[in-house]
Image (spheres, rainbow, N blue to C red):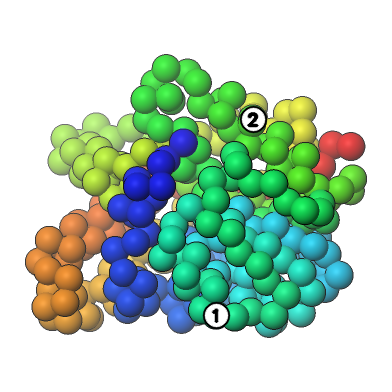
Amino acid sequence: MSTQAEVEVSYDVSNEFFRLWLDERMNYTCGLYEGTDNLEEAQLKKLQWLHDAARVTPDTRVLDIGCGWGANLEFLSTAKKVKSSVGITLSRSQHAEVQARNLPGVNVECVDFRDFQPEEKFGAVISICMMEHIATPEEVREGRHIAAYRDYFGKAHSWTQPGAWFGLQTILRNRVPRNREDLRDIGWLTYEIFPGGLSLRLEDVVKAVNPYWEIMEIQTRREHYGKTCAEWLKRLRHHEELIREKWGDKVFDDYDRYLRTCVTGFEKHYQSLAQYALRRID
């Protein structure tokens, strides 16, 4: 599992920095470009898909594991009028941002999911690109990742009521690059931008959900994530002068390289993305 220090390398550069190039709600995951070319609309469509996958109603108590800066919690609270939702994150900057949004019916905790102890059970779970932080590259190489993922699904099961649904989204590892430069860039990204984490293979999720959750639907969104990253890169470059002035050349150069690598990765099938509707096995 990524440590708090590693998570903060990824997400605590500065909330203001991320606000410059993410969408207005600060979703830091793939949008769903169905019937739109607009990033803001694509991110809303993504949140709607996961809301529907988790079978959320206004009366459902919802847990958001790895809630980021609160984009999904805000969507649930304001657009869907969900009365009670809880977000957990390991990033102190993200935790502060969610608190500052002061969303009705929303509570947020800065906690490792393994230490989370809810006061009451949930009727639905949503987790958007958090599983990538569960197993380190070393644990994957040693074959210990499936047990770690299964523990995550087991904890989610223990926190939910019978009949619960789970809207899940994960980045996937697909082909291994045969191009030396691409291989170097992806290795650099893994250790410099997201230390302590690694994207999953689709079969990892299929193995690890048992015996806790049944996979009812899977959608893959490789092209959508490529488009999302290209839009982030465009927005980042639009603010190049300000970013270099305020956070330094290294931050701009690193994030430009990272987002270029992501665009290439999705284009060449090195990476993909999956969304899942899971039903609790009671």
| Occupied quadrant, residue 197 | top left
Residue 27: tell me if it is visible.
no
Mark 2 = which residue? 150
Q: Amino acid at mark 1?
A: Arg
Q: Nearer the viewer, residue 169 or 250?
A: 250
How many numbered callouts?
Answer: 2
Task: Give the residue furthest to the top.
Answer: 142
> For the point 73% across and 51% down, which residue is it?
118
Q: Is residue 241 left or right of residue 143?
A: left
Secondary structure found at label 2: helix
Give the spatial CA distance, label 1 vs label 2. 33 Å
Q: Position of residue 169 (x, y in %)?
A: 58, 51
199 to 120, vertically: above or below: above
Residue 228: tell me if it is visible.
yes
Q: Amino acid at mark 2?
A: Arg
Secondary structure found at label 1: helix
Neighbour class for label 2 at 10 Å: few (<14), some, many (≥20)? some
Neighbour class for label 1 at 10 Å: few (<14), some, many (≥20)? some
Mark 1 = which residue? 101
Q: Nearer the viewer, residue 169 or 113?
A: 113
Q: Nearer the viewer, residue 36 or 70?
A: 70
Q: Is residue 159 left or right of residue 188?
A: right
Mark 1 touches mark 2? (CB < 8 Å):
no
> For the point 89% across and 45% down, which residue is it?
162
> For the point 50% across and 38% down, which residue is it?
134
Q: Which circle, 1 or 2, is nearer the viewer? A: 1
- Quadrant (top left/top right/bottom left/bottom right) for the C terminus: top right
Q: Is residue 249 left or right of residue 151?
A: left
> For the point 12% across and 69% down, which residue is it?
248
Q: Position of residue 252 (x, y in %)?
A: 17, 66
Mark earlier in primary sequence (1, 2): 1
Q: Position of residue 93 (x, y in %)?
A: 41, 65
